[in-house]
Amino acid sequence: MQTNLTEKMSTKEKILQVSINLFSQKGYSGVSVREITREVGIKESSLYNHFKNKEEILESIFSIFREEFSKLVPPFEFLDEIISKSTVEDFLLRGYENFRTHINHPVNEKFWRILYIEHYREPLAREIFLNDIIKGTIDFLESAFEKFIQLGKMKAYPTKLLASEYQYPLFSMHAEYNMLRFDGKDTSEIEQKMKDHIQFFLEHVTETKN
Amino acid sequence: MQTNLTEKMSTKEKILQVSINLFSQKGYSGVSVREITREVGIKESSLYNHFKNKEEILESIFSIFREEFSKLVPPFEFLDEIISKSTVEDFLLRGYENFRTHINHPVNEKFWRILYIEHYREPLAREIFLNDIIKGTIDFLESAFEKFIQLGKMKAYPTKLLASEYQYPLFSMHAEYNMLRFDGKDTSEIEQKMKDHIQFFLEHVTETKN
DNA sequence: GTCTATACTCAGATAGAC
DNA sequence: GTCTATCTGAGTATAGAC
């Protein structure tokens, strides 16, 4: 279960790590405190020295994810500079690579699964989905595309539409990717789809050279 | 809880209906047999006259969903006729309306939520997602677009790409729609996004009249 | 097909010794 | 901060009377 070098971790970190593993496989309700503490190697009662209750573990996990996800989007104040120096293609491909790096961290992959599993049971998970992930990403892209349009690097479609057309397919392709990974299945086809999508988008929003 | 006119239902149907309600809110593991039977109005032991165990209830639900979802896609043998009589726009808009009707049935909406909640815990749920929903829809669209292209009604892009570009955004927009509905929030914006996407797609794959 | 009664396991959580 | 011990309730499921 790839939980090897946990020796250096504090008990609290171990609890979090084990909980992330288990919650991402069975969901919050499907995992017992007993199971968590057994895997951590402490007694059930000891867990309550680190977390008020089981729920607080999940809250911590969401909080960590939120922080982690926020690192994916460059701060607005750097956007002007980034965009003036980039082509649309470079900008999008770099964003795609950032995201790939993000989800290829095993912990992040599990965060996403927990979010999917819990997003109807936990209002906070829905909030993260709707606000941080969807709105956050779309808003960011809107700003970016607006600047690209101003610089004449992109066709002047409505930025909302552009952001949606670019990002919504990637959301569901990522969901599919994550499912395939869970089963250890081949992901090359869906990865190719993501790249094809980016190219298709680029061809339609930048001037073609014919 | 909109469980009013259950008088005519058989006990088995009531169990299914209540289970669908509860599973779609709290997930399979978050719901107890006790809770189900309490809401149905029978004793726990009576449930086992209708289902071998709790797991079998979920399997039944998935089985019903599968059947229900399969009704959404017209059989392949009618495809030629449908397409020869339709414009691409009519075809896509009719498909969109079919889907809208489907997800606006409260039971179907709950089916989708259960699928989302359970798709990392239950291999069957993943299978339905990957095979029935994603692959089924994409394959269908590929066939359809291929015929449209043959008839000269659509630009000759690779059909796989066309199907992905059309359908993947709708998957995630629907996921967002379903989340918003769960919270009773306004869905007009995301519905507009779906329509805008369809129009955007149409403009780019059919010949424009300028 | 429904009930009562019951079995047995497991859940989350706490008190208090060390 | 960890342990032992224990509580209380909830979990799934079965046997057998009606």
Image: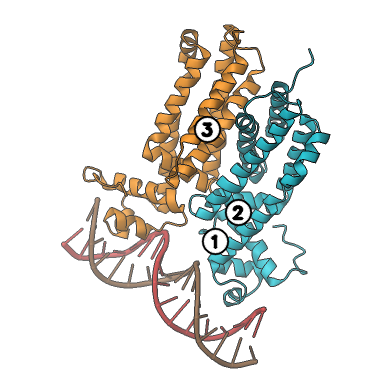
Chain colours: A orange, B cyan, C red, D brown
Circle 2: element type? helix
Q: Which residue bears the numbered disc 2? A: B24
Pointer 1 indicates a residue of which chain? B
Q: Are the residues under marks 1 and 2 on the same chain? A: yes
> Is residue B16 visible in the rendered structure shown here?
yes
Query: Where A184 sits versus B92, above or below?
Result: below
Amino acid bearing label 1: Val
The local secondary structure at tag 3 comes to: helix
Q: Residues within 10 Å of mark 3 (few under 14, many from 20)?
A: some
Residue on which disc 3 sits: A133
Q: Where does the image place residue A101, in percent across and percent down from the top left?
A: 40, 30
The image shows residue B105, relative to residue A92, as above or below, that is below
Pointer 1 residue: B31
- Looking at the picture, which amino acid does disc 3 mark? Ile
Q: Residue at x 77, y 39 (%)?
A: B80
First in sequence, mark 1 or 2: give its number. Answer: 2
Mark 1, other Cα within 10 Å: few <14 / some 14–19 / many ≥20: some
Residue under the point 60% across and 11% down: A208
Work out how far the residue at label 3 is from the one at label 2, CA to CA, in angstroms: 22 Å
Chain letter for mark 3: A
Whether residue B74 can be seen here: no
Q: Are marks 3 and 1 on the same chain?
A: no
Residue ID at (57%, 28%): A167
Q: Nearer the viewer, residue A168 or B2?
A: A168
Q: Are marks 3 and 2 on the same chain?
A: no
Q: Position of residue D11 (x, y in %)?
A: 49, 67
Residue A29 badge: none
